[in-house]
Image: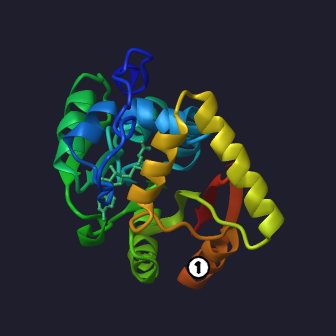
């Protein structure tokens, strides 16, 4: 985790210079290299979320069960959970379809000494079979799936969860109320500027993400979780246009 969260992380300057053409954002080697800096400066509350995912996993992990971290990037959530979970017979399965991410994630996990087994899998999360799961984490990953494919993934996750198992779902949000939307966007913009991103970087990155990160409203998420069959879903964290939901089977 030290490596994934350190202040000496290489700085994200991917969109600092003007690009002739902005292509769709990709989780390639250049992004993986600067990822800890990028996500910390772009997602308000990211550090708190990572710490709390560890704490929540400690509450909900069941003995001899699987813990899935879907879209694990460099493994920050996996490392946080691995440090807090008390059942040493749990197994963490960290999945990402970016080779650049999984390669670095494997190194981060190998450097972290823990009795809890952790495996890093390079795969699309839609191809994973979930079994005996007590905790499933989607920390800012569902938003990258086409909206029409989100329910099918959640159905599969639900089927693989043990009774009492939980899904931790963090997402960027949109709002139906135009005043709230303008206010939350303005505050997020202020956050990114306070973290040293220029107007040019912010606007070029926004264009690059336009077609691949499709945010939904909190209501759309809660309604879908209900349709999937979750007994309860509660928003346990929100900072500006970023939120996290805990859904209980
Ligand atoms: C963290 N959870 O630090 N299958 C597998 N991986 C995917 C897919 C897919 N279909 N689509 C996207 N990804 C992390 C942060 S980042 C969030 C998650 C962000 C992966 C993608 O390669 C990337 O590593 C991750 O999901 C999203 O807690 O960058 O805003």
| In-image side of 235 versus 205 (left or right) | right
Identify the residue under disc 1.
Answer: 224
- Report the front residue among 159 and 71: 71
Q: Residue 189 is drawn in which quadrant? A: top right
Q: Is residue 114 above or below residue 184?
A: above
Q: Residues within 10 Å of mark 1 (few under 14, many from 20)?
A: some
Provide residue 190's location: percent of width, then percent of height.
68, 38
| In-image side of 140 versus 28 (left or right) | right
- The quarter of the rendered structure image containing the N terminus is top left
Instruction: Provide the secondary structure element on which disc 1 rests.
Output: helix
Provide residue 130's location: percent of width, then percent of height.
32, 67
Provide residue 176's location: percent of width, then percent of height.
74, 73
Instruction: Give the farthest residue toward the right.
Output: 179
- Report the front residue among 58 and 207: 207
Is the CB atom of the residue marked by disc 1 within 8 angstroms of ligand 1's nearest atom?
A: no
Q: Which residue is drawn at 80% across and 61% down?
A: 180
- Report the front residue among 19 and 87: 19
- Report the front residue among 47 and 181: 181
Q: Is residue 92 above or below residue 114?
A: below
Q: Is residue 111 above or below residue 130?
A: above
């Amino acid at each position: 985790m030290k490596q994934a969260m350190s202040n000496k992380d290489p700085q994200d300057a991917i969109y600092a210079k003007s690009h002739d053409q902005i292509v769709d954002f990709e989780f390639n080697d250049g992004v993986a290299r600067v990822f800890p800096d990028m996500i910390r400066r772009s997602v308000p509350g990211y550090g708190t979320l990572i710490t709390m995912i560890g704490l929540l996993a400690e509450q909900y992990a069941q003995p001899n069960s699987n813990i899935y971290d879907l879209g694990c990037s460099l493994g920050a959530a996996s490392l946080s959970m691995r440090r807090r979970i008390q059942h040493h017979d749990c197994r963490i399965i960290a999945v990402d379809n970016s080779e650049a991410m999984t390669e670095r994630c494997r190194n981060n996990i190998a450097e972290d000494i823990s009795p809890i087994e952790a495996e890093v899998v390079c795969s699309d999360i839609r191809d994973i079979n979930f079994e005996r799961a007590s905790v499933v984490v989607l920390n800012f990953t569902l938003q990258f799936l086409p909206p029409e494919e989100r329910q099918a993934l959640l159905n599969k996750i639900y089927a693989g969860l043990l009774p009492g198992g939980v899904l931790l779902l963090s997402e960027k949000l949109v709002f139906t109320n135009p005043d709230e939307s303008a206010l939350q966007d303005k505050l997020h913009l202020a956050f990114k500027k306070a973290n040293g991103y220029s107007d040019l970087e912010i606007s070029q990155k926004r264009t690059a993400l336009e077609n691949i990160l499709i945010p939904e409203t909190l209501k759309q998420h809660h309604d879908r979780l209900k349709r999937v069959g979750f007994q309860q879903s509660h928003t346990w964290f929100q900072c500006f246009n970023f939120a996290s939901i805990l859904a209980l089977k």
